[in-house]
Amino acid sequence: MKIPFSPPYIDNDVIAEVTDSLKSGWITTGPKVKALEQATEDLLNCQACNAVNSWTSGAILALKWLGLTDEDEVIVPAYTYCATAMAVIEAGGKPVMVDIAEDMTIDTNKVRNAITTHTKAIIPVDLGGFPCNYPELKKIITSQEVVKLFTPTTDNQRKLGRIMILSDSAHSIGAKINNKSIANLSDITVLSFHAVKNITSAEGGMICLNLPAPFNNKELQHWFKIMSLNGQTKDAFAKTQLASWRYDVIDTGLKINMPDVNAAIALAQIRKYDYLLKERKRVFNRYSSCLQHFKWAVLPFQTKKTNVENAYHLYPLRITDISANQRDMIIQKLAEVDIATNVHYIPLPNLTVFKNLGYKISDYPIANKTFEHEITLPLYPQLTDEQIDFLLENLIKVHDCVKDIK
């Protein structure tokens, strides 16, 4: 029985939507993108959305809007994909890494201790679809002592008047706290529509705007749209309308727009988001109902809080009685019976690019411990109960086989 790690959900509705785009004769940014932006606004109940070609480019553009210098700091967790910190570097700032808490999201106590007069933003990461403690982060950045530390250097920073929360919600479309979607919990939320995500456009992302007054998020959406098209005031679709060829370029933007043919994939999927979430939750709960009986298994995102809703993107299992080498052996042995698993993530300080910048894994003990014991199980709607049971049977058997091997 072959179990891939994360195949995209492609059904007849997706194929029909993409075919419609292809037959229309228009495949780059146009009506499908606008429909996807509206569908995302409706799903997340957010004020304005702008589609881009990746999470990374969306985060870079958001940070460029805020404005960063090489002395400006942005706090990020040490346990995330490299793009979280690289976006800061690409936007001209310095990533300040902090450790994670036991729930695998950013440690809010460490965040408070890391804030300086150079801190301009925080990028919390909803790892695996589990939302960070946004209420506590909001409490920190609006506290009198932290607001006093804030030293703005651009007009947008001055208008905001405090540290910005830019949520890395690449995994967490649909997650909620207190019945509020992630897009209502931070200032700017960036989603990923990469091929393995809950909703995919093959490659893509979405910038969701929730900035407070005096900002007008609809007006900002227009700015983000222009800046995602090289600073050009009309997209290609608008220019093709009769006698509408004239345009202007108002600033040095990026070329990071999402094409219609990509948006079509996500548009078909987002229309059945409730079904896809229900099926992801089914898989998640079936894993947990079995693994809860084993002392060596630390189930992901266990919380007594009833106000937190997971997006069920990943199942990051931690196995307490093995080493990192034994974890790798488990992955290999499962691969030998055609079961694909993964690891989320190698901590940033363990990657060469960040080692060379002076980051040390010894400063992030929880991130390092989590990494050494973590194995991510497949989680997607197409997984059958039979496949899940086959995977669990083999995982338990392989664990018992390797746990005593040094």
Image (cartoon, rainbow, N blue to C red):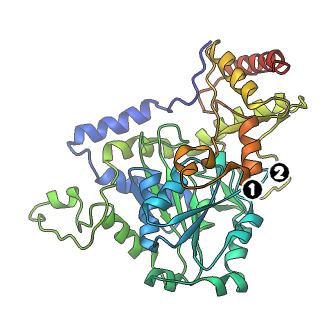
Q: Position of residue 73 (x, y in %)?
A: 56, 69
Q: Nearer the viewer, mark 2 or mark 1?
A: 2
- Point out residue 155 in the picture as x, y percentages from the top left corner: 44, 84
Disc sitting over residue 308 in the figure: 1
Give the SS element for disc 1: strand
| Residue 121, image quadrant | bottom right
Circle 2 SS class: loop
Q: Let me know if residue 168 appears in the view.
A: yes
The image quarter containing residue 396 is: top right
Q: Is residue 240 above or below residue 279?
A: below
Q: Residue at x 54, y 50 (%)?
A: 356
The numbered dot on residue 303 is 2
Q: Residue at image x 72%, y 82%?
A: 143
Question: Which residue is pictured at 50% across the width and 61% down the height?
Answer: 88
Q: Amino acid at mark 1?
A: Val
The C terminus - image quarter: top right
Mark 2 → mark 1, Cα distance in angstroms: 9 Å
The amino acid type found where label 2 is placed reads: Thr
